[in-house]
Image (spheres, helix red, strand yellow):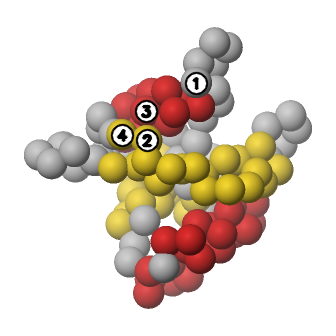
């Protein structure tokens, strides 16, 4: 799982961004990963559930795939650091409180 340190809070969290008007959620995922991490990813599957953020926003989690030969993700926008975590390392970082329920669900589905 790729996690990021949010520059506004210094906690680890999932990369995020809003769905723009007229944009499909899968398109928003691809756009946000390009803008924030500099990668062209493919949306694979949405993790069922929605987790509240500040109103009116909710967090929806997706799995994504980086095509072979893709550039390594970099913290271009909104993040200070990125880190790849194995399932055994997921709880070794200080998560943003609002992301913990979504991370639990994602980890359960990815195991």
Name which quarter of the figure residue 96 lies in: bottom right
Q: CA distance from mark 1 to mark 2?
A: 11 Å
- Residue for badge 2: 43
Question: Which residue does the numbered mark 4 point to in the structure image?
Answer: 42
Q: Position of residue 12 (x, y in %)?
A: 56, 63
**Residue 104, x across and y down, in percent:** 65, 73
Q: Which mark is residue 24?
A: 1
Circles 3 and 4, Cβ within 8 Å, touching? The answer is: yes
How packed is label 3: few (under 14 Cα within 10 Å), some, or many (20 or more)?
some
Residue projecting furthest to the top: 22
**8 vs 17: above or below:** below
Mark 2 Cα-neighbour bin, 10 Å: few <14, some 14–19, many ≥20 = some
Q: Residue furthest left?
A: 69
Residue shown at the point (73%, 68%) measured from the top left: 101
Under tag 4, what secondary structure?
Answer: strand
Up-down relation of residue 87 to residue 12 (above or below)? below
């Amino acid at each position: 799982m790729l996690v990021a340190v949010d520059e506004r809070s210094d906690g680890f969290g999932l990369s995020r961004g809003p769905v723009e008007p007229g944009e499909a959620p899968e398109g928003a995922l691809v756009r946000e990963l390009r803008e924030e991490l500099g990668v062209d990813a493919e949306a694979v599957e949405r993790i069922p559930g929605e987790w509240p953020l500040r109103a009116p926003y909710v967090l929806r989690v997706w799995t994504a795939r980086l095509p072979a030969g893709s550039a390594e993700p970099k913290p271009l926008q909104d993040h200070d650091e990125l880190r790849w975590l194995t399932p055994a390392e997921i709880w070794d970082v200080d998560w943003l409180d609002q992301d913990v329920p979504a991370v639990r669900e994602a980890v359960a589905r990815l195991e």
